[in-house]
Amino acid sequence: MNILIIGAGRVGTSVAEHLVSERNDITVVDTDPQRLRELQERLDLRGVCGNAIQPSVLREAGADDCDLLVACAPQDETNLTVCKVAHDLFNVTTTIARLRSPEFVEGAPLLARGGGFAVDHVICPEQSVTTYIRKLVEYPEALRIIEFAGGRVTLAGVRAGAGSRLVGHRLDQIPTLVPHLDLRIVGLFRREQPLKADGSTRIEAGDEAFVLTRTGSVGEVLGALRERDRPVRRIMIAGGGKVGLRLARELRGRCEIRLIELDRTRCEYLAAELGTDVLVLHGDATDEDLMTDENVGETDVFIALSNDDEDNILSGLLAKRLGARRAIVLINRRAYTELVQGTQIDVAISPQHAVIGELLAHVRRGDVEAVHSMRQGAAESMEIIVRGDRRCTKVVGRRIGELELPEGVQIGAIVRGDEVIVAHGETAIQTGDHVIVFLPSKRQVRAVEKLFQVSATFF
């Protein structure tokens, strides 16, 4: 695909890195020539310096031959204007805009083609991160919770704990160990290396397991792999920016929340917005005396969401040392994400990776309903809608065990109408099925897409 990315900030750079690696033709437009030079030195892409709301700049960037435009400049107004110009003057097929304001909702008349801003899809990293964290609060044992097929199927990432029912046993023993649970372990990682998730593989304590199951069974499935944590009652949030405010709004009334913010003026705004349901504190989350006075040791989940990666890491480590049960930190720089692995911090969240799947679903070939990037972008899970019939596809009418899947790729579940089927080797695929696929390496994406593609010449 010919893809035009507007903005070379953190989100734009992350989008470019993912899409370049999949052999797309990428052009990035930004007003900062130095930033573009650095990006061109690292990645195989073209940079155009200028203001993308100007038609001449878009034309130079190749808007006449653009399949997909992703507008992720810092300002909402820039992204809205770029999408409108790209549609009206260059008839760009698909436009995606990063919009921070909650008042711009995908599908609203204001964003429609024709009379609106011509935005086909909206992405909001702040909301994606908020949703990510809210799921982790709901299931505190998990490392990642991803929903598919309108929330009917869930993929849960969890660190296997010693003494749990499934640890020490082979995968083919799971049906007899937990006969009342319908689940499938589709991915298994040991010391950061992927294992083949077949029947002979034995689960060990410390393994990172990815499990597909019906959404209603997620709690029990997590309990089979590690000891269940008590429900989250007390939360401390460090950082009252856009994500911190969104999260506090979504969780207030359900948990006891304390929010620490360094800027006094912002504190006053937060207190007015959140009311008496949230205790807003003025201070520094890296201050040990403040954290001790505010009883961080009695906190179920400490969440660091400031704009400073170093402060988030330090406050997360401090909270764990003082007794917080779980620490979740927001990290923008990839090097810091890798540095945090192996420390006391339980989950490190990258806003770029939280939102990248929303973009990839529009880039993937075939009928891809959803894509989720996992393990810092190394692995993926996809929801693919099966089209065609037995004459024109390699999957329709065939059992999963007969398919030539790439090494390590697992089909974990099939949604057929209102029915959720946890897949096994004898499960046959039908036209219209929503198939949930786990890929331990994103290098396998093309092979999976090719397998599910409809071909007029296949017999």
Image: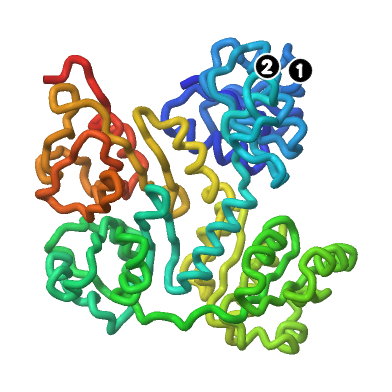
Q: Residue at x 73, y 74 (%)?
A: 278
Residue found at the far right of this picture: 265
Residue 457 lies, in percent from the top left, at 17, 15
Q: What label sits on residue 54 in the rendered view?
A: 1
**Residue situated in front as seen by the camera: 209 or 8:** 209
Query: Which residue carries the number 2 mark?
Result: 58
Mark 2 touches mark 1? (CB < 8 Å): yes
Residue found at the far front of this picture: 418
| Image: 79 above or below 144 | above
Q: Residue at x 20, y 77 (%)?
A: 168
Mark 2 secondary-structure assignment? helix
Residue 250 lies, in percent from the top left, at 63, 63
Q: What label sits on residue 332 in the rendered view?
A: none
| Image: 343 above or below 59 | below
Residue 336 lies, in percent from the top left, at 58, 59
The amino acid marked with disc number 2 is: Leu
Instruction: Give the Cα separation between the discs numbered 2 and 1.
Output: 7 Å
Residue 400 lies, in percent from the top left, at 15, 44
- Residue 431: image quadrant is top left
10 Å crowding of disc 2: few (<14), some (14-19), many (20+): many
The amino acid marked with disc number 1 is: Gln
| Image: 110 above or below 163 | above
- Colouring scheme, one of rainbow, by chain, secondary structure, one colour: rainbow
10 Å crowding of disc 1: few (<14), some (14-19), many (20+): few
The reply to whether residue 350 is visible in this rendering is: yes
Q: Is residue 424 left or right of residue 412?
A: left
- Residue 321: image quadrant is bottom right
Q: Is residue 56 left or right of residue 317?
A: right
